[in-house]
Amino acid sequence: MAASLYGELLEAIQQSQMRGLVNTTEWASDLLACLPSPEALPPLSFQAQTPPKELATFLLARSFFDKREFQRCAHALKDMESDVCVFLKFYATFLGAERDATTSAMSTSTADATPRNKQLLELRRALQARKEKQGLDPYCSYLLGIVLRDLKLKTDAKAYLIESVRGAPLLWAAWHELASLCTGKRDVDQLFAQDLPEHWVLKHFRAYISLELQLNKEALTIYRDLEATFPESTFILAQIGLAYNNMRDLERTQETFEALAVVDPYRLNHVDVYSNVLYVLDKTAELSHLAHHVCKVDAYRPESCCVVGMLNLFQFATMSIAIMIVLSHLIFIHAVRYIAAHALNGLHSCCVRVTQWQALMWVKVKALDNNCKLFHV
């Protein structure tokens, strides 16, 4: 069983790395690291999937992608036809459009979504034309799904994301997007009524979506069970910490995130949640130590900025102008999706006794606009 899991995860990592899907690669690699290594490893698959005449161009374009030169990457692949090259070309175009929209939002007082919507429509047409011509592989189906999601066509987006996980069950990015499109238990029941793949990853998804919908005890039970197969997974341990936090068991939340820090001390994912727990528990020294640590690791990560903002709020009942500027930038850079930045900005307004009710309502509206499943607000 372990050897089979190892082979599946290794293949998923190779496929995701080729295409620049970093979150799926991290998720699968985290699970892979928990399994015993087999004596013989399967060969790398990218050469078999990339025609020899396209291999050199693909590797060149991939180097551009790694440098975040998205337009350059897409241009290098403009004449390539293999599935891997086509996905990377369209994905680079998608990320380039997303970055252009963010830059535009930061440089103007009002964000104009028209240019990005035009690029999304062009991507949709190109992907659908390829589907009619020769079909889409699971990764291009995923890409079309997130394009449709951004165009607010949620029903069509779900259909393509389901098609994606049927063909590539370990494409965690597609499962993650499916979870984001489910706003309640009814949506989840309808999703599981679809022809989802009979695969062990479905248990991971059920745990993840249960946590998203605040079914915390159910999620905790499943994650505890998954720990038996993946005993040192930092992803699973972090999800357990989030479940305890949602249940308001702050002592266990602190213990879980402390254990996580021992296993992976430079992990910044969810460190903002940990800082909030320390704030509520009145752990001044621990919060200060955490703030100094995250700044040494990466001072400009959103989570790091929120930890520093929390410390300022704790110590001075207000935040410095510099921290406020950083949080404002986070709101733009992360497309108004980083809720902690909104919350801290709102709390700052409350602390200085300026329009408390308006500040609280602004935080609530912004948070629920981006994630209607949040219970904190």
Image (cartoon, rainbow, N blue to C red):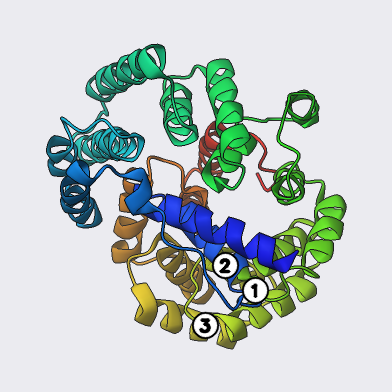
Q: Residues within 10 Å of mark 1 (few under 14, many from 20)?
A: some
The quarter of the picture where the C terminus appears is top right
Whichever of callouts 3 and 2 sits on the residue coming sooner in the sequence is 2
Please say if 116 is above or below 357: above
Give me the C-alpha separation between circle 1 and circle 2: 7 Å
In the picture, the disc for residue 30 is 2
How many numbered callouts? Answer: 3
- Residue 204 position, x and y percent, is 72, 51
Please say if 85 is above or below 228: above
Please say if 69 is above or below 163: below
332 to the left or right of 190: left
In the picture, the disc for residue 265 is 3
Q: Which residue is depicted at the point 23% across and 38% down?
A: 96
Label 3 SS: loop
Give me the C-alpha separation between circle 3 and circle 2: 15 Å
In the picture, the disc for residue 34 is 1
Residue type of the residue flagged with mark 2: Asp
Residue type of the residue flagged with mark 1: Cys
72 to the left or right of 214: left
Label 2 SS: helix
Residue type of the residue flagged with mark 3: Pro
Q: Is residue 330 visible?
A: no
Cβ–Cβ under 8 Å for marks 1 and 2: yes
